[in-house]
Each structure stands twice: as structure tokens, then as C-alpha cells.
Image (cartoon, helix red, strand yellow):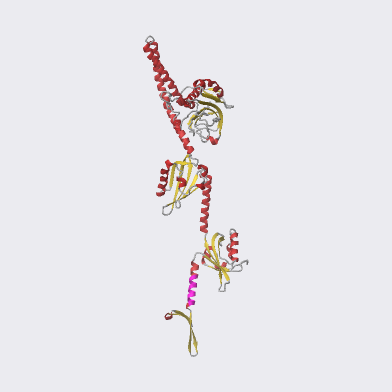
């Protein structure tokens, strides 16, 4: 008879063996307290191993090179759950049964080198389930030695990291897509880590705004310090309002300073990323340079403004002309009948003179409103300039030198020659007034071809070849504010009595009536330029005068049977701040 019993007074477990004997019963006691404790630990360990989610795999230590070695001697329940193999299917087999086409040979070679040196090793391998499905495993392999120090087994603890690898791949793909988008767009892309206050900029920061990313401040200052001082407070306040609020989108339009000092207009858009608690942790956005677009918008608004003024002026001029007709007619009748009364006749003649001046003023207003009668003819522009030179010399002072530069192969144009001469005379007189101490008046003709890329920046200007008539002088010129109003009727910077303010407006109206579209472009020397383009399937450019240091005011006039005027950009009209394009 054999049984185990716990003896409380000694706190010991005993194994009791009782045997019958001739003279009675022989009883033997053996202390099994430590043995029971060891068995309890083994049961606990086996239960823990079977319950853990990580794979536990034990193999013999050798031979490593055997076709079927090292052989598996133990796997836990997690192995069967993760791989789909039963214990019976893998015991005695090699772990190589889990390998497949994508298992990394370089990692296997590294593991082998560690095993040959009896060293622990950690690796990440692609293995395969019994079904053939890929599984990523993170392996920690260590050698086990017996009491004599001889290595007998390898223990591998393997964790399924398939989900982690999928997440890492998704992050990698997203980052790669982000980099591709950031590289493909012309916009400046930025990524602001709000937890560390570090901002990343894409390469467009250099190509669009001229800043080397490596020299920029790491934080918000790299953006804030380059906002125009007059816009900085409002823009920074608006972005912080979104960050501190509950919104996720931010949009602002403001002025941003280029590295060369230019003021650019940008539209900045940002998207805010928040954590589970709603705290802003990251902001990603883009800056778009809309300077040229806003300039085009402004020129369009200015053109529409002049169009409205022209319509109003035309109506007023017609009504005024009707009144003048009555006044002039009656005054002429009175003058004839008051021939013997010199006093009254002088008053009547004064009335006639005033009415005639009013009629001249009305004609100028009608010219601005594009309602005057034109008599267009086919004209050789170069030949016409030679003929008008004597008239210009009589209108200008002797201190002003006149130079006419004629371009080669200038196409013949269709224009009212009388009105064109009047327009040139107006511009020459303006040039004379701007050169009180003398100077140079230059009149040039040229042809210019505008390609599709350049035409895209000009309102309603189609690609083609154009003819330009450029009038420039060495006078003081106009600043940008004056130039903005230069075409408006009755606007003048001259002293009272020295100018009607209708000279440029008359030229403007003549160009518009000829089918042109006017506009202005500020120039760094603050000297105005005027140009017009006449569409003969050609575009006209101003040919720069050899003396580039001279400040020049240019009027460009291109005239054709189907002409059209519009503003040109500073990059195209290098010598002109204001351009007309007659197409």
C-alpha cells in the first residue's frame, strides 16, 4: 500500500509505503516535500507556457546542418494556434518547415552564424502557416546547457508581429506618398509637430521663396519671421485660435516675404490633427503663391472701373454736346445780329469761344468713352513716324532730343492715322512736361512673339505675333499710385490751369475703340510705360533702349483691323510699367 500524506506538525509531505510482514506490517516513510514543490512548479510552468500568446519552440542543439535538424522536441499551444500545425506534425521535424519563398536568406545566415558560436540571437523572419499564409515572427533564440555546461537545446520565443509589420508598411507607404506629393506640387508643403514645435518644409520652400531649408529655424519662427510685419499679428493669432479651439481647418491669405525681399501674396491652408483627448498635436498644410493671380484680378477690376467711367463719361458728353449745340448756335446768331454793338458782339463771341472749347472738351470725353468717329486706314507705321517727326519737334522744346528707332519688317496696320498722331502728340507733350530741363524722347517700333506660357499671364491675350509702338522719355515718371489713376478723365498731377487731365484718357479711349485692352504694371524706377498690341496673328514687344540706366516712360501702341488692348506682366514688358496691347 502507497499513499502521500501531509504531516502538519513538521510541515512536511511524506510518501507512506506499507508492506505486510510475518510478524505484522512494515511501514516506510519518505520525505517528498521538495519533490512535490518541484512538480507543482512544473505544472505551473506548463500551464503558463500553454496559456501565453507567444510561441515557445525547443529544439535539440545539434546537428545544425542535418537535413532534418535541429529537431523540434517541444512546442506550446500558441505554436499550434499561430501556425496551424499540431504537435504530432512537428515534433521531430525541423523548424525549416515554417520557411517559404519570402523568408529572408540574409537573416537565416545571420542566425546560423550566431548558433555556430552558441550565442543568443534576435531576428525578424517571414514564416508561413500550414495554410500557406505569411506570418511575421520576432524570434529570441538562446542556448540551454546541462549541469556540465554542455549545450543541449535551443529555446526560441517567437512573437507574431504580422499586424505591427502591416502597420509599419502602411505608415511607410503613406510617408512615401506624402513625399511624392510634396515633390510633385509647386506649392510649399509644411508639417508642423506641435509637441516639439518643429516644422518641416518641402523643397518648394527654396524654389518658390528662395530659402534654404537647412538654414531655417527649426520651429514656428521659420514661418512667423517671414510674414509681412503688417500681417504677422493677425495671421499668427488666427492659427492659434484654430489650435486652441475645436476646429480642424485653417485658411489665411497674407503677404509673405521672399528671400530677395519681395512681398508675395500667399494662400495658406492647414489641417489640424488632434489626439484622443482633443489636443492639437500636428498640423499639415500648403502655401500657394497667388501674387500673379491677384495682380491679374486687380488689373481686371481696374479695367472694369475704367469701363464704367467710360460709359458714364460718354453719356454725360453726349448730353453736354447737345447743350453746347444750342448755346453755340444761338451765340452765332447773336454775333451776326449784334454786329453794330461792339460790346454785346464781344460777349457773344466770348460765348462762341467758350462753347467751342467745351466742344473740344466733349470730343476728348467721347474719345475716352470710345464714341468718337474713326476713319481707319492701312498704314505703314514706320513711314508715318517719319512724317510726324517735324510736328513733334515743333511741339517740344529745343532741349529735348527726339530719337526714332524703326524695327525691321513691321507689318502694315489698320488705324485712324489722325487719331494715332493725336495720341502720339499727347504723349510727347506729357513727356515734355516731365522733362523741364530737357532730355530724350524715344519712339520705337518692334514686333514680338508671345508663346502660350507667356500669354497665360495676360488677360485675354492670345499667343501670336504683335506690333508695338513704344514711346519713352527720361523724365521723372509716375509712382504706382499715380499710375493707377492715370487713365481716368480729369485726373492730373499738374498745377491748376496747366492740364485738363484728359490727355491719357483720350489715348486710352482711342486704344479701346481700336479694340485694345489697357493695363498698368509698376516698375521699380516708378516710371510709367504704355503699350498696346494689335492682333495680326502676332504680338508686339518693347525693344529695350541701349541706355538701360535712363528712366523711361513708354507708350506702346499696336494697331490692327481687329485690335485688342490688355495689361502685360513686368516680366514681359521689361521697359514698361503700363502696357497696352492692341490685337
Q: Position of residue 565 (x, y in %)?
A: 50, 29
Residue 35 forms part of the magenta stretch: yes
Determine the residue located farthest toward the bottom in the rendered image.
23
Q: Position of residue 99 (x, y in %)?
A: 58, 61
Q: Main secondary structure of the magenta part?
A: helix
The foreground one among 567 and 87 is 567
Note whether 298 is above or below 132 in the view shown. above
Q: Is residue 126 left or right of residue 241?
A: right
Res 559 seen here: no
Q: Which residues are magenta?
A: 34-45
The foreground one among 513 and 438 is 438
Determine the residue located farthest toward the top in the rendered image.
340
Q: Position of residue 317 (x, y in %)?
A: 42, 23
Note whether 462 is above or below 318 in the view shown. below
The foreground one among 496 and 302 is 496
Res 368 seen here: yes
Note whether 135 is above or below 208 in the view shown. below
The residue shown at (46%, 22%) is 372
Note whether 72 is above or below 567 in the view shown. below
**How many labels were placed on the picture?**
0
Residue 37 forms part of the magenta stretch: yes
Q: Position of residue 569 (x, y in %)?
A: 51, 34
Amino acid at each position: 500500500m502507497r499513499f502521500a500524506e501531509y504531516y502538519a506538525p513538521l510541515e512536511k509531505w511524506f510518501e507512506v509505503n506499507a508492506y505486510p510482514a510475518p510478524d505484522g506490517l512494515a511501514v516506510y516513510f519518505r520525505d517528498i516535500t521538495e519533490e512535490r514543490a518541484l512538480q507543482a512548479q512544473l505544472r505551473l510552468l506548463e500551464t503558463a507556457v500553454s496559456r501565453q500568446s507567444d510561441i515557445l519552440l525547443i529544439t535539440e542543439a545539434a546537428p545544425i546542418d542535418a537535413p532534418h535538424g535541429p529537431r523540434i522536441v517541444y512546442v506550446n499551444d500558441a505554436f499550434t494556434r499561430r501556425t496551424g500545425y499540431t504537435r504530432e506534425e512537428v515534433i521531430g521535424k525541423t523548424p525549416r518547415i515554417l520557411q517559404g519563398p519570402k523568408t529572408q536568406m540574409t537573416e537565416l545566415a545571420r542566425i546560423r552564424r550566431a548558433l555556430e558560436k552558441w550565442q543568443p540571437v534576435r531576428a525578424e523572419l517571414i514564416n508561413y502557416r500550414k495554410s500557406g499564409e505569411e506570418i511575421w515572427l520576432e524570434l529570441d533564440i538562446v542556448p540551454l546547457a546541462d549541469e556540465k555546461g554542455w549545450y543541449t537545446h535551443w529555446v526560441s520565443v517567437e512573437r507574431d508581429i504580422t499586424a505591427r509589420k502591416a502597420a509599419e508598411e502602411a505608415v511607410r507607404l503613406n510617408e512615401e506618398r506624402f513625399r511624392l506629393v510634396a515633390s510633385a506640387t509647386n506649392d510649399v508643403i509644411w508639417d508642423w509637430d506641435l509637441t516639439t514645435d518643429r516644422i518641416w518644409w518641402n523643397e518648394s520652400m527654396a524654389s518658390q521663396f528662395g530659402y534654404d531649408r537647412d538654414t531655417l529655424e527649426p520651429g514656428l519662427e521659420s514661418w512667423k519671421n517671414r510674414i509681412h510685419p503688417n500681417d504677422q499679428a493677425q495671421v499668427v493669432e488666427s492659427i492659434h485660435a484654430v489650435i486652441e479651439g475645436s476646429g480642424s481647418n485653417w485658411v489665411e491669405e497674407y503677404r509673405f516675404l521672399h528671400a530677395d525681399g519681395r512681398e508675395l501674396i500667399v494662400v495658406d491652408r492647414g489641417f489640424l490633427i488632434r489626439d484622443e483627448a482633443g489636443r492639437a498635436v500636428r498640423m499639415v498644410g500648403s502655401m500657394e503663391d497667388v501674387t500673379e493671380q491677384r495682380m491679374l484680378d486687380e488689373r481686371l477690376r481696374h479695367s472694369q472701373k475704367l469701363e464704367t467711367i467710360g460709359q458714364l463719361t460718354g453719356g454725360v458728353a453726349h448730353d453736354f454736346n447737345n447743350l453746347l449745340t444750342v448755346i453755340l448756335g444761338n451765340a452765332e446768331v447773336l454775333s451776326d445780329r449784334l454786329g453794330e454793338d461792339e460790346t454785346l458782339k464781344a460777349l457773344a463771341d466770348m460765348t462762341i469761344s467758350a462753347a467751342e472749347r467745351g466742344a473740344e472738351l466733349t470730343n476728348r470725353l467721347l474719345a475716352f468713352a470710345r464714341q468718337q468717329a474713326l476713319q481707319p486706314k492701312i498704314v505703314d507705321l514706320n513711314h508715318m513716324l517719319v512724317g510726324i517727326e517735324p510736328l513733334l519737334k515743333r511741339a517740344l522744346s529745343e532741349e529735348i532730343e527726339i530719337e526714332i528707332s524703326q524695327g525691321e519688317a513691321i507689318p502694315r496696320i489698320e488705324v485712324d492715322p489722325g487719331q494715332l498722331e493725336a495720341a502720339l502728340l499727347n504723349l510727347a507733350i506729357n513727356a515734355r512736361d516731365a522733362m523741364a530741363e530737357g532730355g530724350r524722347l524715344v519712339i520705337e517700333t518692334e514686333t514680338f512673339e508671345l508663346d502660350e506660357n507667356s500669354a497665360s499671364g495676360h488677360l485675354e491675350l492670345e499667343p501670336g505675333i504683335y506690333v508695338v509702338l513704344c514711346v519713352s522719355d527720361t523724365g521723372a515718371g509716375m509712382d504706382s499710385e499715380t499710375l493707377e489713376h492715370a487713365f481716368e478723365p480729369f485726373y492730373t498731377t499738374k498745377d491748376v490751369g496747366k492740364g485738363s487731365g484728359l490727355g491719357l484718357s483720350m489715348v486710352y479711349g482711342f486704344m479701346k475703340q481700336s479694340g485694345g485692352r489697357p493695363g498698368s504694371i509698376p516698375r521699380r524706377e516708378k516710371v510709367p510705360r504704355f503699350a498696346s498690341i494689335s492682333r495680326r496673328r502676332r504680338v508686339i514687344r518693347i525693344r529695350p533702349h541701349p541706355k538701360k540706366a535712363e528712366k523711361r516712360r513708354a507708350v506702346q501702341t499696336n494697331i490692327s483691323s481687329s485690335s485688342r488692348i490688355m495689361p502685360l506682366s513686368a516680366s514681359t514688358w521689361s521697359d514698361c510699367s503700363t502696357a497696352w496691347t492692341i490685337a
